[in-house]
Amino acid sequence: MTVLKPATRAKLATISTATVATALFKRGFRTQFVQDVHPLSPDQPVLVGEAFTLRYMPAREDLNQLSVFRDRSHPQRKAVEDCPPGAVLVMDSRKDARAASAGAILVTRLMKRGVAGVVTDGGFRDSAEIGKTGFPAYHHRPSAPTNLTLHQAIDINVPIGCGDAPVFPGDVILGDSDGVIVIPAHIADEVTEEAFEMTAFEDFVTEEVRKGRGIFGLYPATDDKTLADFAAWRKAAKR
């Protein structure tokens, strides 16, 4: 797994998924936003970390009884214990929230181990309880039935699809109030730097629009005066 630089991690925590999506679009990446997942709590912190993945497949009933949890190598339990501190557990639940990907006990274990957060394109049971922990968690919708009902945990730390987004182990995950986006690991630093610069400009533009300024020539910055005004704003704001 790649190791996210502390400076990159810190900058990403100040950047929106929308801005990162634009930076990725400029590089030809169109499907990196995880579809139909939502934060469990509107107050949860921004999520930043490297992806550690778990893949579910459709359950086969004779192989997916409660007795499977006696095996310490069971992929779901092993993923919870093996996901590195600072990483994000990302689960491919086949966009199926009819059975839970995990519940409050497993998510609490992740939190206590120092994992950065958890994402599934399925659902969580005990979702209200998870939402109260302050731990960054994203899912499609609440789901009470155990994962064993429909999902069979099959692989750990392999390439997966989560909400139609491709996720490779070590890719960088960013989650905010809008949702979750996946940054390919090999361009994470450069995308972060560009998005960080874009954020400064967008903050300047927001201030100007709130003052009543029109968007022509301002956003995008097609007028030389806009660039001059931005430079002056940035110097004054120490941005």
Image: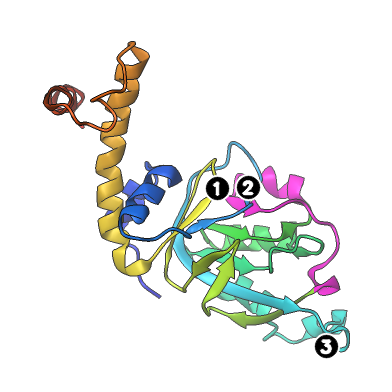
Q: Quadrant of residue 34?
A: bottom right
For the residue marked with disc 1, what is the amino acid? Answer: Gly
> Is 149 included in the stretch rendered in magenta?
yes
207 relative to 165, above or below: above
Residue at horizontal 36%, vertical 55%?
Answer: 24
Residues packed near mark 3 inside 10 Å, few (<14), some (14 to 19) or many (20 plus): few
- Horizontally, residue 134 falls left or right of residue 143, namely left
Q: Residues within 10 Å of mark 1 (few under 14, many from 20)?
A: many
Label 2: which residue? 38
Q: Where residue 41 sits in the image (x, y, percent)?
A: 64, 41
Residue bounds of the magenta highlight? 127-150
The numbered dot on residue 179 is 1
Q: Which residue is found at the position 25% from the left and 25% from the top?
A: 218
Q: Residue at x 70, y 83 (%)?
A: 74
Q: Is residue 120 left or right of residue 181?
A: right
Tell me residue 208's x, y (percent).
29, 18
Look at the image and tell me in which quarter the N terminus lies.
bottom left
Q: Tell whether label 2 touches label 1 (CB within 8 Å).
A: yes
